[in-house]
Image (cartoon, rainbow, N blue to C red):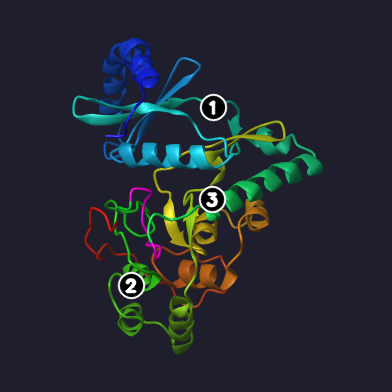
Amino acid sequence: MVPHGPKTQWFIWTIVAPLWRGALPFINFVKSCSPFTDLSTFKVTLGRFIFVKYSPHAETEAATMRFVRDRTTIPVPRVWGVLTFQGLPYLFMSRLPGRDLRFPEALGSLSDAGKDRVLDQLKGFVEQLRALEPPTKPPFICSVLGGPVLDHRLSTTGPYGPYRDEAQFNSQRRQGLTVEQYAVYSKFSPEVLDAVRRAHAIRHPIVFTHNDLHRGNILIEGDRVTGIVDWECAGWFPAHWEYVKALFLIYDPKDPWLKDVPTFIPAFEFEANVDMNHVGWTRDWIGVVLEPGFDENIGFPVAESLI
């Protein structure tokens, strides 16, 4: 369990818990009526100030938010605690002001100078994340707790890892196959085989990564960034991965956000092109498409921690 201080415990059990118990029957009814019965998360607000998220990974996300909030100036929700109701973990946190960038009026109402100020703040936040010290020496690819990482580009079935190095991480990207085996399975041309081999031979620094930095997880009020949310996928990853994931989470090749991402996340064009065109799920409009890859959940077993 994520530890709570006395004030936080008092807040949860005297304020939050009664509200939550009253709301829980309705929430369970809504969930039972949903056609998406396999959703991994469920979110609801309690009043103006409390946000509740159900997630199997609530403990890790709570630890991550506390870790980032304590060490940076990034606007991260305050964690009140993780409570279990009916065997399910719920993460209680503060509700941050602002609207996420998916709303047209969020960025659309800004002047060019205002948008630049937003992007500049995001750049500073990413720099702060990448400067955080990892829990291991040498750094592993892992969560803040030193355990598995959650990344739906690695696996849709749950957390994988941790990984001792980038070579093991890349092997997971290839479903445990060598580059040559993966090329045969995916029917790569010699040119694609060479590109994948070169990309997976690069050894990047391991840096702290939000790993889900799309517009829906960025809140603003005017030209001020008021929140970065949804930290369940965060952890230490190879330096190119934040950029790869940010592009992968864009679904429209005409989306202007494509041009904005490199202004606040260091760009790794070659790695992004190779990964998204030839390894795993593809975005066939990014870079030059030669031949698509495939996605299959094999990979390394989950370990509790490498710390």
Q: In the picture provided, is 232 more to the left or to the right than 95?
A: left
The residue sitting at 53% across, 70% down in the picture is 273
Q: CA distance from mark 1 to mark 2?
A: 38 Å
Q: Give neighbour class at mark 2: few <14, some 14-19, many 20+ (Cα, 10 Å).
A: some
The answer to if 144 sits in the magenta stretch is yes
Q: Does residue 261 sit above or below 48 in this rendering?
A: below
Residue 182: x and y, percent?
33, 78
Three-letter amino acid code at disc 1?
Answer: Leu
Q: Nearer the viewer, residue 174 or 189?
A: 174
Give the class, few, some or many, for how many residues have Cα within 10 Å of label 3's Cα (few <14, many ≥20): many
Quadrant housing residue 14: top left
Residue 285 in magenta?
Answer: no
In depth, the one of 194 and 240 nearer the eye is 240
First in sequence: mark 3 or mark 2?
3
Bounds of the magenta span? 137-145
Among numbered discs 1 and 2, the one appearing first in the sequence: 1
Q: Which residue is mark 3?
A: 129
Of the residues shown, which amino acid type is indicated by label 2?
A: Ser
Question: Quick check: can you spot residue 14?
Answer: yes
| Quadrant of the snapshot with the C terminus | bottom left
Q: Quick one: quadrant of the N terminus?
A: top left
Return the residue at label 2. Answer: 171
| Relative to 100, 303 lies left or right | left
Determine the CA span between mark 3 and mark 1. Answer: 20 Å
Nearer-N-terminus badge (3/1) = 1
- Residue 96, which numbered label? 1
Q: Is residue 254 left or right of residue 202?
A: right
- Secondary structure of the residue carrying numbered label 3: helix
Residue 40 visible, this orientation = no
Looking at the rendered structure, the number of numbered marks drawn on it comes to: 3
The disc at residue 113 is none
The image shows residue 88, relative to residue 126, as above or below, that is above
